[in-house]
Image (cartoon, rainbow, N blue to C red):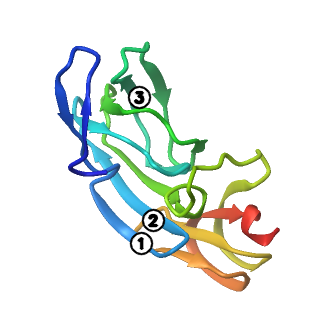
Amino acid sequence: MRGDVVISPSGEEIVLVDVGRRVLHDDPVIRVWEVTLEPGETHPWHLHHNPYVVLSIEGSEGRMDWLDGSGPRFISEHRGGFVYRPVSPVHRLTNIGTTFYRNRLVELKDLGENLPEPLDVRPDDVGVRTVTDVTLDLEGPHVLAALDGEDVRLHPGGPCRLDGEWFVVELAYLAR
């Protein structure tokens, strides 16, 4: 979290930043951040205390560097893509591509900071799809995030009309 201090392998004190630029939604179950990077820009060292889902709005090539000195992870994200990540070590993200990068990062607080120890989820516990101009009848809680605009919400389940293009993130573990 912002302001936490960690020590690098070389003994340097590193002050961590938030996992995103700004919070778009926060409730007891989820916290949704906006993450943006211009080409060549780096999001500084940060730590995820919660498992999370990355929803790509505007994709680019990226490099994740780990404070512990592990080799970098190279990523390639595209509009409408998504990835689930468990709690991860301190890292930073650099946009090494030539296009603007923007995502919605959905922290699953009830699998992390709301517990004594973070839990990992099974592959079928969190599902993501993109939809366009639909009416859905959602079974159980879902995160809804617009691909165009800042509308992000936790939907309890039931009927839902979505105009435009949306991510629909099923939180199946909450329905068990």
- The answer to whether residue 5 is above or below residue 11 is below
Provide the secondary structure element on which disc 3 rests.
strand
Mark found first going from the N terminus, 3 or 1: 1
Question: Alpha carbon of mark 3 to alpha carbon of mark 2: how far?
Answer: 25 Å
Quarter of the image where the C terminus is located: bottom right
Left or right, 34 with respect to 138, comes to left
Amino acid carrying mark 1 in the image: His
- Residue 46 in percent (x, y) is at 32, 40
Amino acid carrying mark 3 in the image: Glu
Q: Name the residue carrying label 2.
A: 31
Mark found first going from the N terminus, 3 or 2: 2
Left or right, 159 with respect to 46, comes to right
Callout 1: 10 Å neighbours few (<14), some, many (20+)?
Answer: some
Q: Name the residue carrying label 1.
A: 25
Amino acid carrying mark 2 in the image: Arg
Give me the disc on residue 61: 3
